Image (cartoon, rainbow, N blue to C red):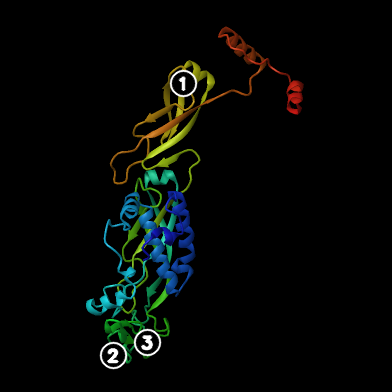
Amino acid sequence: MPSDPYEVLGVSREASPEEIKKAYRKLARELHPDANPGDSVAEERFKEVSLAYEILSDPEKRSRFDAFGDARGGGFDFGDLGGFGDLFATFFGGAAGGATRRGPQRGADVLAEVEITLEEAAEGVEREIELETMASCDTCAGSGAAPGTSPQRCSTCSGTGEIREVRRTMFGNMVTAVPCARCGGTGQEIVEPCDTCGGAGRVRGVDVLTVMIPVGIDDGRRLKVSGRGHAGVRGGSSGDAYVQIFLAPHPTFKRVDDNLGVEVEVPMTVATLGGTVEIPTLEGAHEVEISPGTQSGAVVRLKGKGMPRLGGRGRGELVALLKVMTPTDLDRTQVELLEQLAAARGETVAPAKGFFDRIKGAFT
């Protein structure tokens, strides 16, 4: 893939995780193989986008890339060698980005997106996911040849699956190998194609996956289901299915790693005199004592009330940010009591205004 995942996703190096995720989801929808059947360019771009997101969505991998220019912490990509890639291919059998595809080909991977609630992430949930995949043709058992016949050795490449070309370079004559266009690199051609699949050996179908989403999973995590991607070509192994998890926004809680944050409104009187407030948790309301004179912005931490950690290693904490509320619906008696309190404390307050006084003040 290109050396810079930021360029692949079209984001700046200062992009936030949310911006990176938004860019990835947009590109993934546009380039997904199901939306571009038969488009090999879109499929390659989809793989590039998925790998770029895998790097930038992982803080450790992103940090390594920012520091070393490679998510592995060193090394380089043979794809950056340009014309020298062919030279490596000549001596190492196509190991430098020019590998040919002889014989059965592995099927492509597929990606599905699943959105779950915070509560489902906390408890774990089982989901059935429908995937549109290329399945092995039952009529020809995936060979692509009509029943009673079999694929023949390709007459163009003599079964090697590749065509060798000689190019003149500054180093002399260089031999490069490219996949045979006639057989697609398999080394075999179909003389009598199967009527069901037209010689492809695969047919489009719908596969239903039952996926157990583990307790504590976080937004952006990807689950792998081996062998449930597209069927391979001419007997090749099947690809894998990946399930990308996204958490729906929650009306009450904000999640940060394994911790939860919540804003809790506290009546002015309780904040002033002390008392109890109810703090919401995933298991229900939790009563907490607060001290007299509590100010807005005070924080209450509840250990073990956050999200379960993936793998069952305890739970994070819940952080409640207290917000003292100024009353706005006081009746006359309550206003008088507050005025008496202000006077007792030597504080100057504006006299209470009637309805018409407030209307007049709005115009002036």
Residue 294: which disc?
A: 1
Q: CA distance from mark 3 to mark 1?
A: 78 Å
Q: Nearer the viewer, residue 44 or 106?
A: 44
Using the rendered image of the protein, determine whether residue 187 is visible from the camera's viewpoint. Answer: no
Q: Secondary structure at mark 2?
A: loop
Q: CA distance from mark 3 to mark 2?
A: 11 Å
The residue depicted at 25 percent of the width and 80 percent of the height is: 90
Q: Amino acid at mark 2?
A: Ser
Q: Residue furthest top?
A: 344
Q: Nearer the viewer, residue 227 or 253?
A: 253
Q: Quadrant of residue 86?
A: bottom left
The residue depicted at 74 percent of the width and 24 percent of the height is: 361
Q: Amino acid at mark 1?
A: Thr
The residue depicted at 37 percent of the width and 44 percent of the height is: 123
Please give the residue where the numbered disc 2 appears in the rendered image: 158
Q: Secondary structure at mark 1?
A: loop
Asked if 203 appears above or below 24 in the picture, the reply is: below
Labels 2 and 1: the sequence-earlier one: 2
The spot of residue 137 in percent (x, y) is 38, 78
Please give the residue where the numbered disc 3 appears in the rendered image: 182
Please tell me how crowded label 3 is: few (under 14), some (14-19), or many (20+) other residues with Cα within 10 Å.
some
Please tell me how crowded label 1 is: few (under 14), some (14-19), or many (20+) other residues with Cα within 10 Å.
many
Q: Quadrant of residue 233?
A: bottom left
Q: Residue furthest bottom?
A: 155
Q: Residue furthest front?
A: 170
The spot of residue 11 in percent (x, y) is 46, 56
Q: Quadrant of residue 142?
A: bottom left
